């Protein structure tokens, strides 16, 4: 399937307001997008931020056993293209 230039721009447009749903207290301003799930791998996309999604639903927190990095797993929703994306957020240090 060939994407047009407009579709590519739309995919990464910035949303002015968003809703966040979380089962625990979290400050998402301390996190950045590390990557998103694409098939069996994590795709790291430069320039992708939390502001690109209309709503975010936080799933869980986790940490890497070896280097102790903290992560949050979330679902990002884009209303315009009716798409959900599984995000991996990394704690900024």
Image (cartoon, rainbow, N blue to C red):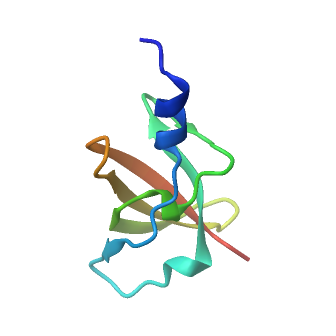
List the single residue furthest toward the front: 6
In this view, 23 is above or below 9: below
Q: Return the x and y of residue 36 as percentages of the image width and height.
A: 50, 45
Q: Quadrant of residue 23?
A: bottom left
List the single residue furthest toward the right: 93
Between residue 77 and residue 88, name the one nearer to us: 77
| Residue at the spot 35% in from the left edge and 62% down from the top edge | 54
Say which quadrant the N terminus sits in.
top left
- Residue 18 appears left or right of 38: left
| Residue at the spot 69% in from the left edge and 47% down from the top edge | 46
Q: Return the x and y of residue 4 as percentages of the image width and height.
A: 50, 22
- Residue 7 appears left or right of 93: left
Q: Return the x and y of residue 75 as percentages of the image width and height.
A: 34, 56
Q: Quadrant of residue 67?
A: bottom right
Between residue 63 and residue 29, name the one nearer to us: 29
In this view, 15 is above or below 39: below
Q: Return the x and y of residue 84 as percentages of the image width and height.
A: 31, 46
In this view, 65 is above or below 80: below
| Residue at the spot 37% in from the left edge and 56% down from the top edge | 76
> For the image shown, how many numbered marks are present on the structure?
0
- Residue 19 appears left or right of 52: left
List the single residue furthest toward the top: 1
| Residue at the spot 36% in from the left edge and 67% down from the top edge | 60
Between residue 56 and residue 7, name the one nearer to us: 7
Between residue 18 and residue 74, name the one nearer to us: 18
Say which quadrant the C terminus sits in.
bottom right
């Amino acid at each position: 399937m060939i994407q047009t230039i407009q579709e590519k721009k739309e995919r990464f447009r910035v949303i002015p307001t968003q809703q966040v749903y979380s089962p625990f207290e979290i400050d998402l301003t301390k996190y950045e997008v590390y990557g998103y799930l694409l098939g069996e791998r994590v795709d790291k996309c430069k320039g992708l931020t939390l502001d690109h999604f209309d709503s975010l639903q936080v799933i869980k927190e986790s940490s890497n056993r070896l280097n102790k990095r903290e992560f949050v797993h979330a679902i990002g929703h884009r209303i315009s293209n009716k798409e959900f994306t599984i995000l991996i957020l990394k704690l900024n240090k």
